[in-house]
């Protein structure tokens, strides 16, 4: 069967072909074409379009096309679902989904930057995802957090302060964690709450409850969304990116999800917010 998507793949459009060829359709032929030709060529050739707005195999809310393939084809392998979290985090700039997401994005961003052939990039990607699958099956419990990595620094904060400061109103670990999250926001070097609970052998429900007490009464996810909306506001003011681009740059899988969260945080939809910004700039110059 033929499968077709947009050219210049990087994350989901490499991961999905790997998943299709390894677990759905071993003889799958993957076709990359310009965005505006995908649906036309799909109709002409009978190919299945994927990772494209408006088609069945696509993003849904905070889920990637990779997630949809798992659900559609009832793939229950736990290793695949571990990979799904990494792909989802890398593809939507939500590195809190999985600590490996930042590395996956960095690798494929660099490979895509150097590559002049989508076919060569796919061939290399298949090998990389085979390796990632072996890790997700057999090696995922092994930890290599050493030196001054952000993850290790965050774990040190937890180890040093979590049990010592339970009774204080604003424990030292919370202050340090807030500073680290803010410092690392631009590089998306974040630690997921789940990973912290596993590393520390602390009940995740307890850790989640303690987090909210010291971070604006928000859950870890809500706190990170708040910061991403703040980043979106900065992009609207300082860049020429359209709203769809800003949605993806700030970790939202689609513009409707971005609009809903943005309005919840600011009271305005993104278009109105940007319009008010532009008007304010014009008024200040006049």
Image (tube, rainbow, N blue to C red):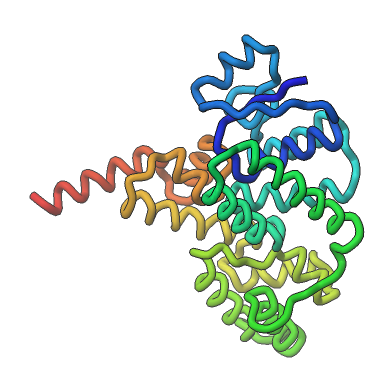
Q: Is residue 71 above or below residue 268?
A: above
The residue sitting at 61% across, 62% down in the picture is 218
232 and 122: which one is in front? 122
The residue sitting at 80% across, 66% down in the picture is 204
Q: Is residue 62 above or below residue 177?
A: above
Numbered label tally: 0
Q: Is residue 210 above or below residue 22?
A: below
Residue 191 at x, y percent in the picture: 67, 67
Q: Is residue 9 above or below residue 192?
A: above
The residue sitting at 86% across, 50% down in the picture is 79
176 and 141: which one is in front? 141
Locate residue 36 relative to residue 134 in the image: left or right: left
> Which corner quadrant holds the N terminus?
top right
264 and 86: which one is in front? 86
Residue 241 at x, y percent in the picture: 38, 44
The residue sitting at 68% across, 40% down in the picture is 122
Residue 170 at x, y percent in the picture: 60, 82
Locate residue 217 relative to residue 27 in the image: left or right: left
* Residue projecting furthest to the left: 286
Residue 31 picture quarter: top right
Residue 152 picture quarter: bottom right
Residue 167 at x, y percent in the picture: 71, 86
Locate residue 170 relative to residue 2 in the image: left or right: left
Locate residue 245 relative to residue 175 in the image: left or right: left
């Amino acid at each position: 069967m033929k499968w077709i998507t947009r050219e210049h793949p990087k994350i989901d459009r490499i991961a999905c072909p790997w998943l299709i060829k390894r677990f759905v359709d071993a003889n799958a032929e993957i076709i990359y074409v310009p965005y505006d030709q995908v649906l036309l060529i799909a109709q002409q050739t009978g190919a299945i379009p994927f990772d494209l707005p408006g088609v069945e195999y696509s993003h849904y809310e905070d889920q990637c096309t990779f997630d949809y393939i798992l659900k559609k084809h009832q793939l229950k392998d736990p290793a695949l679902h571990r990979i799904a979290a990494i792909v989802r985090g890398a593809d939507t700039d939500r590195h809190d989904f999985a600590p490996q997401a930042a590395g996956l994005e960095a690798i494929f961003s660099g490979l895509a930057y150097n590559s002049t052939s989508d076919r060569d990039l796919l061939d290399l990607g298949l090998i990389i995802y085979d390796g990632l699958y072996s890790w997700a099956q057999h090696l995922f419990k092994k930890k290599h957090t050493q030196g001054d990595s952000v993850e290790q620094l965050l774990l040190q904060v937890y180890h040093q302060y979590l049990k010592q400061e339970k009774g204080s109103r604003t424990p030292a670990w919370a202050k340090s964690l807030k500073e680290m999250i803010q410092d690392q926001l631009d590089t998306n070097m974040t630690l997921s709450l789940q990973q912290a609970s596993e590393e520390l052998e602390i009940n995740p429900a307890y850790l989640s409850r303690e987090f909210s007490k010291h971070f604006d009464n928000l859950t870890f996810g809500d706190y990170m969304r708040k910061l991403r909306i703040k980043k979106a506001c900065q992009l609207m003011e300082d860049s020429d990116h359209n709203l769809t681009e800003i949605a993806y740059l700030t970790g939202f899988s689609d513009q409707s999800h971005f609009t809903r969260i943005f309005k919840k945080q600011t009271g305005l939809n993104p278009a109105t917010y940007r319009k008010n910004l532009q008007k304010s700039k014009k008024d200040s110059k006049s």
